[in-house]
Image (cartoon, rainbow, N blue to C red):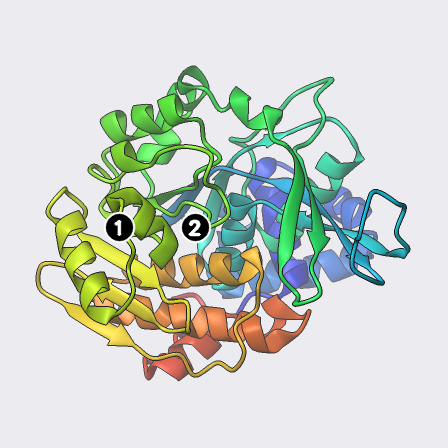
C-alpha cells in the first residue's frame, strides 16, 4: 500500500517526470536520502519504473466537477431574528469532485481531477491537499484573478446544515470548449465521474462526446437545475430518493415505489442505478440485478463527504468489474468507513481494508 508521503512524491513526479531527488527533497522538506528511500519504495511497489521516473501506466479514473471551500457556522443558540450570534466557525476543503478524487486516491486508484481553482489561498489549500493525496490536477484550470468557489453553511440544532450562501461562479469556466481541450484525457479513463456543478451545456457535451463509461453523481443538495436530460447517456447514475422522486415528479414512500421508479429510469438509458436510502443502505438496479442492501454502519452522518465516499466506493468496484451489487456494497463499505472515522476519514479507507471487508483477495504490492 502506498503511504501518504509516497502519494505526495508520486504526485510531483506526475506533474514533472524530470524532477530531481534534490527538488523533491526541497518540496517535501525532507532529506535527499529520505526521498531516495521513498522513490525506491515506489519502484518496488510498481508505481514508477526505473531511475528515469517512468510512470506505470494503469487505468485511471477521471473526475469532473467541484473543488471548493465550505465555511460552516455552529451558533450557540437558535437564531430568532437578525441579531449577531456567537458560535464557532471553521472552513473545510469541499467540492464533490475533489472529495471523490481524494477518496479514490486513498483506494490506490490513479485519479485525474478536472476542476477550477482560483489564484487565492483557498486554491493553494485545495491543490496542496490533492497533491498530497496523489490526485493528478494537471488538467484542472487555474484562473488568475478568480476567487475559488465557496459555500457558507449554518448548522441547525439537529446537526443538519442549511446552505445560506453559494459562490459557484468559478465552475462556469468548465465550458464545453475547455472540456474539449481535455477530451483525450477524459475519454481514456476507465470511468469518468461527473458531478452537478458542471454547467448543463458542458454536461451535455460530455454525454455526446465521451466514449468512456460515464458515472453521473449529482449532489443531493444541488436542486437548482432539472436533471432529466442528464439521465439517458451515463452508464451509471447515483441519485438519492428525493432527487429520484423530483426527476419523476412523484413521491417515493416505500420500497415498492422505489423499485418502480428505478425500473422506469433504467428504461431511459442508464445501465446501473445506485439509490442511497434515507434510513441507510442502498437500492441498486440494472437489467440483470436488483437488490436492497442494508446499512450496518451506525448513525448516518449529515455530510457531503459521506455521499462522496459512497460514490468513490461504487466507482472503485465498477472499474474492477465487480458488477452492480458488489459495487454498491463497495460504496456502502466506503461510506461506513467515512461514518466511523470521526474526522480521520481517509485513515481507515484504503484498498486493503476494502478488499478485506468485501471478502476479496488482497493485492500484493505492485499489482
- 315 or 47: nearer the viewer: 315
Label 2 environment density (alpha carbons within 10 Å; few <14, some 14–19, many ≥20):
few
Tell me: residue 287, above or below residue 339. above
Picture coordinates of residue 171, whole percent (x, y): 55, 27
Quadrant of the image for the C terminus? bottom left
Tell me: residue 73, above or below residue 18. below
- 229 or 121: nearer the viewer: 229
Q: In the rendered view, does 271 fall on the left or right side of 329?
A: left
Residue at 54% x, 33% y: name it.
115
User: What is the secondary structure assignment of the residue under circle 2?
Assistant: loop
Q: Residue furthest front?
A: 80
Residue 253: in sight, yes or no? yes
Residue at 42% x, 25% y: name it.
182
Q: Which mark is residue 56?
A: 2
Foreground tag (2 vs 1):
1
- 64 or 266: nearer the viewer: 266
Picture coordinates of residue 273, whole percent (x, y): 24, 56
Toward which corner of the image does residue 302 lie, by quadrant?
Answer: bottom right
Q: In the rendered view, does 323 fall on the left or right side of 152?
A: left
Label 1 environment density (alpha carbons within 10 Å; few <14, some 14–19, many ≥20):
few
Picture coordinates of residue 270, whole percent (x, y): 19, 47
Residue located beneath label 1 in the image: 250
Residue at 65% x, 62% y: name it.
4
Tell me: residue 312, above or below residue 237. below
Tell me: residue 337, above or below residue 166. below
Residue 49: in sight, yes or no? no
Picture coordinates of residue 52, whole percent (x, y): 55, 44
**What whole-number distance in Å separates the C-alpha atoms at marks 2 and 1?**
49 Å
Q: Earlier in the sequence, mark 2 or mark 1?
A: 2
Amino acid at each position: 500500500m502506498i503511504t501518504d508521503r509516497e502519494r505526495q512524491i508520486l504526485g510531483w513526479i506526475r506533474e514533472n517526470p524530470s524532477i530531481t531527488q534534490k527538488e523533491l527533497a526541497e518540496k517535501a522538506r525532507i532529506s535527499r536520502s529520505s526521498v531516495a528511500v521513498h522513490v525506491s519504495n515506489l519502484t518496488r511497489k510498481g508505481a514508477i519504473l526505473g531511475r528515469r521516473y517512468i510512470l506505470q501506466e494503469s487505468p485511471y479514473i477521471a473526475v469532473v466537477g467541484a473543488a471548493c471551500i465550505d465555511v460552516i457556522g455552529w451558533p450557540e443558540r437558535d437564531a430568532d431574528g437578525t441579531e449577531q450570534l456567537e458560535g464557532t466557525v471553521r472552513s473545510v476543503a469541499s467540492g464533490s469532485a475533489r472529495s471523490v478524487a481524494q477518496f479514490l486516491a486513498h483506494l490506490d486508484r490513479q485519479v485525474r481531477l478536472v476542476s477550477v481553482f482560483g489564484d487565492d489561498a483557498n486554491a493553494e489549500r485545495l491543490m496542496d491537499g490533492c497533491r498530497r493525496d496523489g490526485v493528478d490536477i494537471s488538467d484542472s484550470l487555474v484562473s488568475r484573478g478568480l476567487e475559488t468557489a465557496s459555500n457558507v453553511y449554518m448548522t441547525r440544532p439537529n446537526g443538519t446544515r442549511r446552505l445560506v450562501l453559494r459562490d459557484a461562479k468559478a465552475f462556469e469556466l468548465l465550458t464545453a470548449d475547455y472540456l474539449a481541450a481535455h477530451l483525450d484525457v477524459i475519454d481514456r479513463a476507465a470511468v469518468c465521474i461527473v458531478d452537478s456543478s458542471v454547467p448543463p451545456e458542458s454536461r451535455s457535451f460530455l454525454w455526446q462526446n465521451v466514449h468512456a463509461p460515464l458515472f453521473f453523481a449529482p449532489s443531493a443538495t444541488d436542486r437548482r437545475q432539472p436533471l432529466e436530460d442528464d439521465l439517458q447517456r451515463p452508464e451509471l447514475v447515483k441519485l438519492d430518493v428525493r432527487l429520484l422522486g423530483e426527476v419523476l415528479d412523484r413521491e417515493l414512500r416505500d420500497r415498492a415505489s422505489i423499485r418502480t421508479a428505478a425500473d422506469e429510469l433504467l428504461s431511459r438509458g442508464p445501465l446501473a442505478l445506485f439509490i442511497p436510502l434515507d434510513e441507510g443502505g442502498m437500492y441498486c438496479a440494472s437489467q440483470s440485478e436488483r437488490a436492497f442492501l442494508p446499512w450496518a454502519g451506525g448513525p448516518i452522518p449529515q455530510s457531503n463527504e459521506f455521499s462522496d465516499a459512497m460514490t468513490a466506493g461504487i466507482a472503485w468496484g465498477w472499474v474492477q468489474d465487480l458488477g452492480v451489487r458488489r459495487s454498491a456494497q463497495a460504496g456502502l463499505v466506503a461510506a461506513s468507513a467515512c461514518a466511523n472515522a470521526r474526522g480521520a476519514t481517509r485513515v481507515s479507507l484504503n484498498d486493503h481494508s476494502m478488499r478485506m471487508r468485501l471478502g476479496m483477495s488482497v493485492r500484493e504490492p505492485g499489482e
